[in-house]
């Protein structure tokens, strides 16, 4: 058993550890490697079992053992149980209380974060009464607002199982573009053209990142890191020294406030609330949350019976399962559903439908 064998070691020691492990396996002794380094697992292992919360979410063998598949399985993992197990839990433990159910959702981590923020604010106020002054609260929130809007966009990338490293340089690049058009003395047509160019620039950058990942087989980290470097270079070519003051009227609109609260922060809060509602209560939101974790169905062995060549769109199952919990399946659906899917497919003791199968899915939220 090798538990994180190369954690905290230099390159030379890492190569030596790999050599020793290979020598051991060549002598006929099997080795189990426990590692969080996907690239390391790809180079060392013939078979990789991805675990999440003590459960197997995917098993990779042969040519499937590549870094992208390992990371994808880990990022998209969700806790899932089959119908019989869910029924046993319901009968044995009873329905969870409101507080217990909340602790199982993905909103629970916000509570300790909010408590820590409040405690830090109280500590700062105890050290300096001006810490919670209107001026300081406004400055803190206006700075957090920009990061909040960027965070909303980054959330979409995370829901799709990726990550975007280029958002920081992109924000800087868009400010550079604005410095040429959104200036004092410029007509409003020119200012509007500047905002339009900023929007087009953001769309083009996102499209390039998407094409590199989707069609050129770049990993999200590699594609967005390359864009990160490119945007920094272009920004420096356009403005090698600070220059171009943003129009004062535009600045006044962006920095408007209601008491100590920036208006932009209120817009951000409303946007976050609307987005959260859409993700949890609309079909499009469920589709987005499931889009990376639920790839399209293809033929593979299933506990329900032999696999068929049928391909089934995952959306009807998932949005129904998220709302109702259990859905009868036809024989064709049962046969086409893969064994390792977002929800478990198991033979039911009392068949609820013609296929003799039921789907029960319990998300982590």
Image: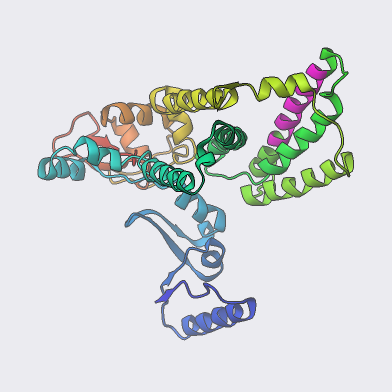
Residue most toward the left?
92
Q: Residue at x 68, y 43 (%)?
A: 168
Q: Quadrant of the N terminus?
A: bottom left
**What residue is shown at x 82% (from left), y 41% (from top)?**
235
Residue 66, compared with residue 145, is above or below; it is below
Q: At x 65% / y 47%, what residue is drawn?
A: 165
Residue 344 in view here: yes
Judge from the rendering whether residue 212 lies leftward or rightward of residue 193; answer left or right. left
Q: Is residue 295 above or below residue 287?
A: below
Viewer-proximal residue among 362 and 84: 362
Q: State left or right for residue 80 relative to residue 3.
A: left
360 sits left or right of 135 in the view: left
Q: In which quadrant will I find the C terminus?
A: top left
Q: Position of residue 339 (x, y in %)?
A: 34, 46
Tell me where residue 45 appears, x and y as whole percent.
49, 68
Nearer-the-camera pick, 338 or 82: 82
**Majority secondary structure in the magenta region:** helix
Pinpoint residue 4: horizontal percent, then vertical percent: 46, 71
**Is residue 2 rendered to the left or right of residue 347?**
right
Q: Nearer the viewer, residue 345 or 241?
A: 241
Q: Is residue 102 magenta?
A: no
Which quarter of the figure has residue 204?
Answer: top right
Q: Residue 53, position in %: x, y?
A: 34, 54
What segment carries the magenta color?
191-206
Above or below, 87 against 187 in this view is below
Tell me: residue 332, above or below residue 118: above
Q: Is residue 215 visible?
A: no
């Amino acid at each position: 058993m090798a538990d994180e064998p190369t954690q905290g070691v230099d390159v030379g020691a890492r190569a030596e550890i790999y050599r020793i492990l290979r020598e051991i396996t060549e002598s006929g002794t099997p080795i189990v490697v426990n590692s969080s380094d996907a690239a390391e697992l790809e180079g060392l292992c013939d078979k990789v079992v991805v675990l999440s919360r003590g459960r197997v979410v995917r098993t990779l063998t042969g040519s499937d053992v590549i870094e992208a598949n390992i990371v994808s399985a880990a990022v998209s993992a969700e806790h899932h149980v089959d119908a019989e197990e869910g029924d046993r839990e319901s009968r044995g433990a009873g329905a969870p209380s409101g507080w217990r159910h909340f602790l199982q959702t993905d909103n629970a981590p916000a509570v300790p974060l909010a408590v820590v923020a409040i405690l830090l604010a109280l500590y700062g106020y105890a050290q300096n009464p001006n810490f919670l002054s209107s001026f300081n609260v406004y400055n803190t929130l206006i700075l957090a607002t920009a990061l909040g809007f960027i965070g909303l966009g980054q959330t979409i990338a995370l829901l799709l199982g990726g990550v975007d490293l280029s958002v920081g340089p992109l924000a800087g690049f868009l400010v550079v573009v604005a410095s040429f058009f959104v200036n004092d003395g410029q007509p409003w047509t020119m200012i509007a053209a500047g905002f339009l160019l900023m929007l087009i620039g953001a769309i083009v950058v996102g499209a390039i990142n998407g094409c590199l990942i989707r069609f050129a087989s770049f990993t999200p980290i590699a594609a967005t890191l390359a864009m990160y470097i490119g945007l920094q270079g272009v920004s420096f070519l356009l403005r090698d020294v600070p220059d171009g003051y943003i129009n004062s009227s535009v600045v006044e609109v962006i920095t408007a406030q209601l008491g100590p609260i920036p208006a932009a922060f209120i817009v951000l809060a409303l946007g976050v609330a609307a987005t959260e509602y859409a993700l949890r209560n609309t079909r499009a939101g469920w589709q987005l949350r499931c889009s990376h974790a639920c790839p399209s169905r293809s033929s593979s062995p299933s506990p329900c019976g032999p696999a068929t060549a049928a391909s089934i769109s995952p959306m009807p199952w998932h949005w129904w399962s998220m709302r109702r919990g259990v859905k009868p399946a036809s024989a064709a659906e049962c046969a086409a559903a893969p064994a390792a899917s977002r929800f478990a497919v198991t033979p039911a003791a009392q068949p609820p439908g013609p296929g003799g199968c039921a789907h029960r899915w319990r998300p982590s939220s």
